[in-house]
Amino acid sequence: MITTVPTAPPTPPLPVPLPLVRLRLSPHGTLLPRRIDGVWWPHSRDLLTQLPKMLAALPSAWGDITGVTVDAAAWSAAPGRMFVANQVVRLHKAPASPHAPDRVVLLSPGLGRWDLQVVPPDATEEAAALLTAAALDDRRPGAGAEARPPSPTTAAAGPRGRVRPAGWGTRAPRW
């Protein structure tokens, strides 16, 4: 004879925490043109896993990023296109420029271009802080900020903000 023992209903799985993205953007309100719009410290050189998380963490004012250019030698193999946040993002791999080593360039139609300095994934926190300070000029007189690495932010899930109408201007205020 087989008897069945009632069991408790399965408990729902705990929510998985959103991945942290180490990203620090240039302060807004600056009047001078910037060479670098932010610093990104990925956890690995796997572009397929790291890029979608970073794109999701960008401000919606940057619009939909449709093109990304990366240093071909610095990143793992990746296809020419990725589907991120319900849109196609074209990936361009180019040789690193001697004037802009290890940089990621983001393009948004009608809004412009943003350049992010990439901190190597294996960098120490101290090295990341120094690279970030140098890239964002955190130590300029009167800045009043300590050198600090890109701060972890939680990537937002779902599609990002829509692109504003064409002609909004390139390199316009972005935040």
Image (cartoon, rainbow, N blue to C red):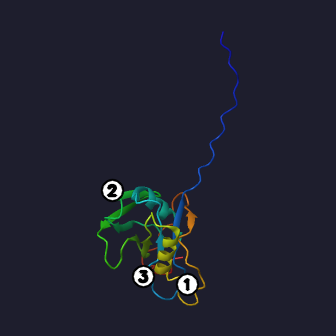
Name the residue: 53% across, 86% down: 30
Residue that sits furthest to the top in the current view: 1
* Residue 79: mark: 2
Check disc 1 and give the amino acid type.
Gly
The Cα–Cα distance between marks 3 and 2, rounded to whole angstroms, is: 28 Å
Q: Are marks 3 and 2 in contact (CB under 8 Å)?
A: no
Q: Quadrant of residue 51?
A: bottom left
47 horizontally vs 53: left or right = left
* Residue 35: mark: 3
137 horizontally vs 4: left or right = left
> Can you say which quadrant of the picture contains the C terminus?
bottom right
Query: Foreground residue, 159 or 165?
Result: 159
Check disc 2 and give the amino acid type.
Pro
100 horizontally vs 174: left or right = left
The Cα–Cα distance between marks 1 and 3, rounded to whole angstroms, is: 15 Å
Check disc 3 and give the amino acid type.
Arg
Q: Which residue is mark 1?
A: 29
> Looking at the picture, how far across and down is residue 46, in whole percent?
40, 57
Name the residue: 32% across, 65% down: 92
Q: Quadrant of residue 82?
A: bottom left
The Cα–Cα distance between marks 2 and 1, rounded to whole angstroms, is: 36 Å
Q: Secondary structure at mark 3?
A: loop
